[in-house]
């Protein structure tokens, strides 16, 4: 079969109306039109990329690969024993987090406030992975989670749009719950100890990334604050003053980066 990328090198001479050569001229003219058409299409595609008008599904191969990582990537790759947070603290201070516990992978039951669980229900729960970290001073604890959903790219894009439009990632009745591991500094890290949180719905992977932070001494926090607000200049709340917004946001961002690296590595290997 002849395509535009593979011209017919065995083309035969054709005749039209008994005059030789007219068929060849038509072929040449058709080829010229095809080249012009491809140029116009290419320009349109380039324009859409510049304008950000791209397929919300992104790399569909990478999307599918990401959805399988929960049972193929070592825990140390998704949740490293130590996470460096260069410039992640208040005022650009460096942070280092040490993993103190990894939760058994499982279902999403009881991992989120009821309202948040309801908001996430449309994308389903294939698997939930969680780990809890502490900072270098062991005064803060943060649980970070990777919710692997059952959704396709369109459903993830729809969920992200809804969270952004309705501000669902900023409501105090829609918070992820911590993983309190006995025998660690996070043993008393319960719902009442949550101080700040960050949540991100990805659209290039069927994953929701989140982190929730609190004080290691088990003190109750009466006014938890979303990380983005706690990180604002001049914020005076307890989560802001203690840097717990930076803890949640910084750790969530770095775990998300690690997830993306794992997707790239898995694609290269396959």
Image (cartoon, rainbow, N blue to C red):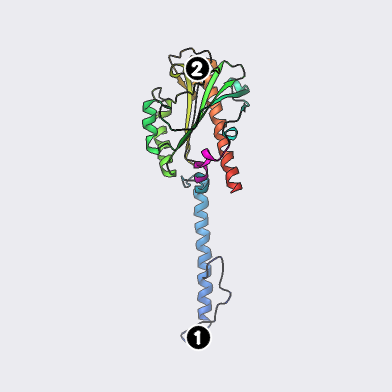
**Pointer 1 residue:** 19
* Residue 87 place in picture, x, y as percent: 62, 25
* Magenta portion: prevailing SS class: helix
- Considering depth in this image, is 92 or 196 the residue closer to the camera? 196
- Considering depth in this image, is 97 or 81 the residue closer to the camera? 81
Residue at (61% x, 47% y) in the render: 269
**Residue 110 visible in the shown view:** yes
| Dot 2 or dot 1, earlier in sequence | 1
Residue at (49% x, 57% y) in the render: 41
Q: In the orientation shown, which residue stands out farthest toward the bottom?
A: 18
* Residue 164 place in picture, x, y as percent: 42, 33
**Residue 236 visible in the shown view:** no
**Mark pair 2, 1: CA separation:** 87 Å
Residue at (50% x, 58% y) in the render: 40
Magenta span has 73?
yes
Decide: is 94 above or below 241.
below
* Residue 10 place in picture, x, y as percent: 57, 77
- Considering depth in this image, is 31 or 221 the residue closer to the camera? 221
How many C-alpha atoms fall within 10 Å of the one at disc 2: few (<14), some, or many (≥20)?
many
- Name the image quarter holding residue 112: top left
Decide: is 158 above or below 42.
above
Is label 1 in a helix, a strand or a loop?
A: strand
**Pointer 2 residue:** 239
The residues colored magenta run 64-74
């Amino acid at each position: 079969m002849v395509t535009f990328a593979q011209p017919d090198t065995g083309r035969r001479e054709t005749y039209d109306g008994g005059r030789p050569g007219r068929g060849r001229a038509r072929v040449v003219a058709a080829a010229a039109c095809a080249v012009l058409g491809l140029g116009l299409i290419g320009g349109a595609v380039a324009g859409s990329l510049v304008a950000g008008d791209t397929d919300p599904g992104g790399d569909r191969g990478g999307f599918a690969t990401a959805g399988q990582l929960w049972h193929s990537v070592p825990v140390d790759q998704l949740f490293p024993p130590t996470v460096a947070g260069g410039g992640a603290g208040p005022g650009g201070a460096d942070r280092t987090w040490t993993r103190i516990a990894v939760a058994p992978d499982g279902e999403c039951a009881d991992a989120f406030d009821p309202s948040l669980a309801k908001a996430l229900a449309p994308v389903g729960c294939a698997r939930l992975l969680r780990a809890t970290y502490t900072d270098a001073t062991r005064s803060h604890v943060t649980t970070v989670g990777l919710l692997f959903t059952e959704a396709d790219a369109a459903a993830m894009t729809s969920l992200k749009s809804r969270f952004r439009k309705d501000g669902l990632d900023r409501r105090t009745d829609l918070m992820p719950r911590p993983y309190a591991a006995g025998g660690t500094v996070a043993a008393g890290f319960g719902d009442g100890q949550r101080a700040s949180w960050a949540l991100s719905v990805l659209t290039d992977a069927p994953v929701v990334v989140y982190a929730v932070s609190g004080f290691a001494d088990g003190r109750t926090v009466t006014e938890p604050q979303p990380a983005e607000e706690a990180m604002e200049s001049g914020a005076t709340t307890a989560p802001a003053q203690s840097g717990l917004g930076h803890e949640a946001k910084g750790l969530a961002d770095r775990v998300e980066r690690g997830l993306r690296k794992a997707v790239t590595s898995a694609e290269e290997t396959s």
